[in-house]
Amino acid sequence: MRSATPGPGSGPSEGRGARSRGPAGAAHPAAAGEPAADAEDGTGRGPLRYAAAAFVFAVGMAGTTLPTPLYGLYRQELGFGELMVTVVFAVYAVGVIAALLVAGDYSDKLGRRPVLLAALLLSAASAGCFLLEGGLPLLFCGRLLSGFAAGLLSGAATAAVLELAPGGSRGFAATAANMGGLGCGPLLAGVLAQYAPRPLTLPFATHLVLLAAAGALTLALPETARPPRPRPRLRPRGMEVPRQVRPVFVPAALACFTGFAVFGLFTAVSPGFMSATLHIGNLAVSGAVVFSVFCASLLGQSASARTGAPVALPLGCLGLVVGMVQVGLSLLLGSLVLLVTGAVTGGIGQGLAFRSAMTTVSRRAPEEHRGGTISALFVVAYLGISLPVVGVGALSTGLGLRNAGLVFSACVVALASGVGAWLWRTRKSAAAAPAPVD
């Protein structure tokens, strides 16, 4: 019998009618049996619609990382320490997790466009909170709204891009839009804050303009979902991990946790490392370093599709180990070069580990429980992007930021090494097992 799960080397959201999901989103059933967007009409406008949907996704996700190079300026203006920076950052993950668990499948029930518009409005409200510059409460509110927006975009925008993408690029389209947006946020904010006036205002005003353009494009996009009639009741989707999935879920989730912890380090704390330890105060450089992490993750996810999940998952853990060793050495030696190479190596490792973890778990999960299982995987991943980073902030109050970063690097190296060794032993055992007799 032919399996309905993705084939070897495929991403977890590839193929028409597959469950669509993105690097920061929950599982989303694509409209099975719908024609590809490039064949849906005779006007030849399918690629334009796909590009427009990708732009909307990228603009929405850029807002979630836009404050990254600006946290040092907020520290100076509002007078809080590194611990509070990490707490403000972690509030974002709370918003993402809440949105995934409560509304992860709303675009299937309501349509893609209404959910996309709601996400863009939440992102605009987040930018408004930062523009008001009214102290910590507004920063917390802005980050929470940004998390809600990202949680909605993860499902709805991933599905929309997949359904509008040309057939040959469908498996990689949403990942590119997602990671591209996440990477461009800190790069845009860093360049504007460094070289333009009003560094805490212009980045968010610029994002509001981009959001307005994204909203107009969303209204012009065709509705790719077919909401059921009558409309089902809107309720939290929940999460669950069936018993048969747990043997692969645990190492995959630990790999995701570790990879997202590296993301959290760079998006919340690396600007502090650069100013306090490397004595580099250029915000554009800080933004470029974070940009390199997300670009490298995109490369890793692309390589994972070619390597295959059984090899890519332990290889990704190895990349995380090497990357964090380089980050630790950069803090010890005060080297920007080592920090950048650590960002690139760790980003590639994160991309390899993340996409292969998604593929492994989605293959094993039964169809009727796949959405809840993927939601559980993302909850673990977003715990990874928040809790360890708050730990770095807490340690920095007693040890200093440099030593806290060294402790974090050592913990990531230990966890990634253990998970990688576990995965490699499991792979060798599976290869040595006799093949089943049909």
Image: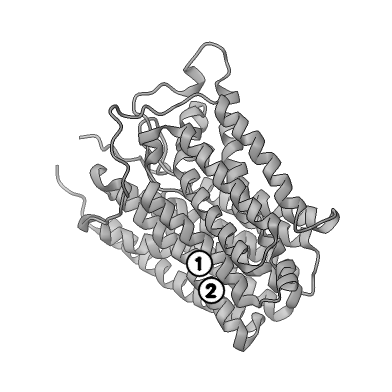
**300 or 240: nearer the eye?**
240
Quarter occupied by residue 130? bottom right
- Is residue 122 in view? yes
Q: Which amino acid does label 2 sit on?
A: Val
Quarter occupied by residue 194? bottom right
Q: CB under 8 Å between callouts 2 and 1?
A: yes
Q: Eyeballing the image, is 415 above or below 382? A: below
Q: What residue type is labelled 1?
A: Ser
Residue drawn at (50%, 62%), measured in percent from left and top? 259
Crowding around mark 2 (Cα neighbors within 10 Å: few <14, some 14 to 19, many 20+) is many
Q: Eyeballing the image, is 110 above or below 411? A: above
Pointer 2 residue: 390
Residue drawn at (62%, 66%), measured in percent from left and top? 268
x and y percent of residue 342 in the render? 64, 66
Numbered label attached to residue 339: none
Q: In this view, does 176 lie to the left or right of 313?
A: right
**376 or 231: nearer the eye?**
231
- Is residue 172 in view? no
Label 1, secondary structure: give it: helix
Quadrant for the N terminus, please. top left
Q: Is residue 85 left or right of residue 315?
A: right
x and y percent of residue 414 in the render? 47, 76
Pointer 1 residue: 386
Determine the residue located farthest toward the left in the rendered image. Answer: 438
Q: In this view, does 49 lie to the left or right of 244?
A: right
